[in-house]
Image: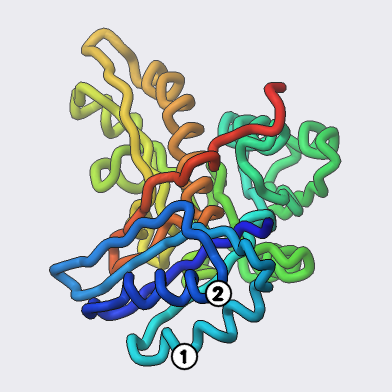
Amino acid sequence: MSKYALTVMCKSSRGIVAAVASYLAEKGCNITDSAHFDDQETGRFFMRTSFASELGESLEALRDGFEEIAKPFDMEFAFHDEAEKMKVVIMVSRFGHCLNDLLYRWRIGALPIDIVAVISNHMDYQKLVVNHDIPFHCIRVTKANKPQAEAAIMSIVEETGAELIVLARYMQILSDEMCQKMSGRIINIHHSFLPSFKGANPYKQAYERGVKFIGATSHYVTADLDEGPIIEQDIVRITHAQSAADYVSLGRDVESLVLSRAIHAHIHHRAFINGNKTVVFPAYPGSYESERMG
């Protein structure tokens, strides 16, 4: 039995949920999970529905037939096959904790993605990546060659058909052009609980302010540095006795967890950009299951 998901965004209006549910029922589909949100401030409506096609209706047929339902509401909608794995490019510099965590989750099936390439501006993790049978690309970035370096990165993205770029502590600022071209398809992990301590050395900034917890923020990348819509955040408590170096060590686990949660939300089509914010629906039943334990 085919399992699909439908995502919808449109102006808030009476009858949207009923129209979606009625259409799926008429096509022999059984809804297994559904979430929706009506933003009273913006007047925008968001919906994600998981369903099983019990009569074997194809995704293409469902998509074509839904056009008539979507038209009166001016919906932006998409049908997704939940068995398909999103193609992802991971980018990393010299901090490898997030990369290692993602590779482990990918290997056991906890993150059902297809890692089509790892790109770095250093050679530190070449052996690790190649040992996982994943293509590794070292693209050095300087002020002088930045346009050429980004062109090489985008060439890999396009050749592999990657749908998402993950910045797993990639310590280079992307150009406005690249951010706009990949809008809504680049996820970053920032080692701070935004909006506090943006930019460079956030742990040092936090230490100097004497904060009582530090955190990590995963967000969509925009041309405005560390200002993109936030997908996921978490924190860890600290005390006055800890050093700035302790902050870095304590932050590693939080960064890895927050980044993996954000990717999980994106690949399962649970995250919607809503202006400078996001709507992130809860994980549906079974979406965190792993194929194996190690």
Which residue is at the front of the view, 226 or 4? 4
Residue 10 appears in which quarter of the rendering? bottom left
Image position of 131 (left or right of 190): right
Indicate the secondary structure of the residue bearing disc 1: helix
Q: Judge depth for marks 1 and 2 and give the one in front.
A: 2
Location of mark 2 (residue): 27
Residue 65 placement (x, y as % from top left)? 55, 85
Picture residue at 31% right of the left edge, 12% below the top? 242
Disc marking residue 68 = 1
Residue 152 placement (x, y as % from top left)? 73, 66
Work out whether mark 1 precedes mark 2 in sequence or the reverse, and give the earlier one: 2
| Real-space CA distance between mark 1 and mark 2, rounded to the nearest whole angstrom | 14 Å
Question: What is the three-letter code of the residue carrying label 2?
Answer: Lys
Picture residue at 37% right of the left edge, 74% below the top? 9
Question: What is the three-letter code of the residue carrying label 1?
Answer: Glu
Residue 93 placement (x, y as % from top left)? 61, 42
In what quadrant of the picture does the N terminus appear?
Answer: bottom right
Which residue is at the front of the view, 271 or 125? 271
Image position of 174 (left or right of 148): left
Picture residue at 72% right of the left edge, 51% below the top? 114
Indicate the secondary structure of the residue bearing disc 2: loop
- Kindly give the residue lying farthest to the top in the view shown: 241
Residue 249 appears in which quarter of the rendering? top left
Residue 185 placement (x, y as % from top left)? 53, 63
Image position of 232 (left or right of 5): left
In what quadrant of the picture does the C terminus appear?
Answer: top right
